[in-house]
Amino acid sequence: MPKLLFDNIDEPGLNTLEVYQRRGGYESLGHALSLSREDLLATIMDSNIRGRGGAGFPAGRKISFLPKGEMQKYLVCNADESEPGTFKDRELMQKSPHMLIEGIMIAAYAGNISTTFIYIRGEYELQADILEAAIAEAQRAGFVGENVLGSGHSISLVLHRGAGAYICGEETGLLDSLEGKRGNPRLKPPFPAIEGLYAGPTLINNVETLATLPAIVRMSGAEYAKIGVENSTGTKLISISGDVVRPGNYEIELGTPSREIIYGLAGGPPSGRKVKFWFPGGSSSPVLTGDDLDIPYDFDSMAKAGTMLGSGAIIVADESRRVLDTALKVAKFYAHESCGKCVPCREGTNWTEKMLRRIYTGEATPMDLDIMASVQEQIIGNCLCVLGDAMAMPIGSMVQKFRAELEAEIEEARRRNFGNEADEVIGLGVADELAGPLPVH
Amino acid sequence: MAARPTVPRFAHGSRVPGWDDAVDLTKDPATIPDPATTPVPEALRASIEASMAKYPDRRSAAIPALHAAQAIHGWCSPEAIDQVACVMQLTPAYLESVASFYDMLETHPRPVHDDVYVCTNISCSLLGGDEMLDALIGAAGGDETIHVSSFECLGACDIAPMASVNGEYVGPLIEEDAATIVEDLRAGRPVLAAKQLRNRRCVDDGTAPGQAPDAPPRQFGEPDHSLRADAVGLTDADRAEDRPGPSAPIETTPETPAEG
């Protein structure tokens, strides 16, 4: 498999225009500009590349949703990489910023867009500085700005730094934030392709998706589609972290068995411990266990296993870890990051965190797990955006797959904190009350 | 019976103190500050105006403008917000609503300070992020000019547990690094130079399987290694070293001066 994004990524000076161009950089942009928009779009469609940010929507179709004709349209590159466990875009932007800029220019030409933005999370200061320098360099060389490469098309590019809010990675929250407001998600429809930034049609893509476009144009869409497996074409950057010997970013061919990634590339958990559970696509994906390591790592196989590939961030926890600790971290994170606009998410994340804390203090009963599972069900699909779902899916899967362990935790904490009084204080007391006739509402 | 935690209650059983305090009806809502009576530092004005010029709508510059004001005032104080509001011609209330939404904008009084964000999210906490936070709070020892806070995933789980010190990512940290970080900050030198993310190599060696790692990259010829314009800071010595992982040493930057 060829490396498309990480090809010699540590080459010194790759962040400068000179080295990037020596490697054939911006040739794809020149080639793309010589094609008609329809041909370029057909190339992207042929590649069958799916969005790399998490939802996995075909990138070519996303461009084709934009209204045709001359009007003010926008492209926003989503570089607000905040999903816990994900850090692939960081490495790409830091080491090969021109690849992203070239991809943005290609996508902007395909969609007939003249104004583009990169929304980068505020914490990525080094990466933002590097990108800013690269944009200035590309502008001087005529790859960005007025009359790109003498083609008559003008495409501006502005880097916008966020200020630390996970919800701004959600596309409509990102648009509000870019407009200078609080980053609250919007009601959809209208979708951003029709009414997005400044109420204009807007194309929003992840860094990795856009950075892959130069490679697709260079090798042709049909060739690109030969990499990977059916319906999950191409290569994917994956970020692997947690209990593994060699954490970091790897470029893999989609469809690689998960075991090969976790054990082959990342070396597996240290000291020969076994994998207990792992998040296959960032903290918002339902967890898989050590028995699921042979599932091929691609969009459809992951969906079939009841989880998702998401942003391609694998977090591994080995057998020395407690599920409860991770569940609380997940719930606490989403409770903190919920923007508070929709009730199921604002209250659901908050109460899930509280219920998990009750397990630690010994106040929980096994019934709490049923309530928790029901809370998760009631969040999913009931909010403007998927932040609530992003907590509900992993927590729901943990309660389902590790119920016995969580029940043991509840029992142990209860004995520890309440001793022999335990049965009277809460556990059986509550259960007895509820065993009687329930009041009729 | 064991004591159960009590929830503090205020008037009418509410958990929110002061929820029923009357609004001061004698006051008018704050309007856009008058440029004649609101002195704005020249550098701040220039920076905000430059930000506003970049966007089709000036409001888009709210976050960069508040960042710039915070750098001068230490936090988004009423004074700082007034200055931004004056230049941007927006109401202070609008800017306050923005400032209170984002984690990197401070809405509580602080002197001009160094920010130490310690990641305590999943990957970092698995590997000791919470202990690192305690160690750093201890090392800072109540110094108001060093603001240590826990932060959600900073996007550097490969160097877990990690921290962002004034935007500089460092990791993987051990407890002894806490004291070094504070010392480096006080001495004004680059923080924990040996563990900065900017010097770290990608674990993916960037070559196709079966291809020797040192084979010339594709058809574009051998890169000129004498070029050192890279912000990545890699050197030839780095390239020869083993690739990192928790068990392998992190590359060091030989040029970094030991003393600031």
Image: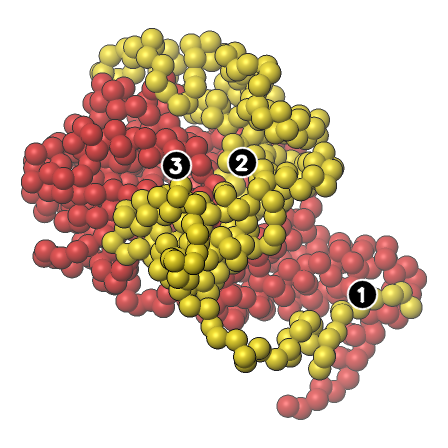
Chain colours: A red, B yellow
Please indicate whether residue A1 sits to the left or right of residue A67 in the image: right
Q: Quadrant of residue B257?
A: top right
Asked if one can make out residue A231 in the rendered structure from this viewpoint, the answer is no
Above or below residue B125? Residue B247 is above
Asked if one can make out residue A361 in the rendered structure from this viewpoint, the answer is yes
Could you tell me which residue is drawn at 28 percent across and 67 percent down? Answer: A190
Could you tell me which residue is drawn at 92 percent across and 62 percent down? Answer: A420
Q: Quadrant of residue B57?
A: bottom left
SS at mark 3 in the image: helix
Marked residue chain, label 2:
B
Marked residue chain, label 1:
B
SS at mark 1 in the image: loop
Q: Nearer the viewer, residue A281 or A107?
A: A107
What count of labels does the image hold? 3
SS at mark 2 in the image: loop
Residue behind mark 2 = B166
Residue behind mark 1 = B5
Q: Amino acid at mark 2?
A: Asn
Marks 3 and 2, Cα distance to the nearest angstrom? Answer: 14 Å
Question: In this rendering, which labeled residue sits more in front, label 1 or label 3?
Answer: 3
Within-10-Å neighbours for mark 2: few <14, some 14–19, many 20+:
some
Q: Amino acid at mark 3?
A: Ala
Residue behind mark 3 = A128
Disc 1 + disc 3, Cβ < 8 Å:
no
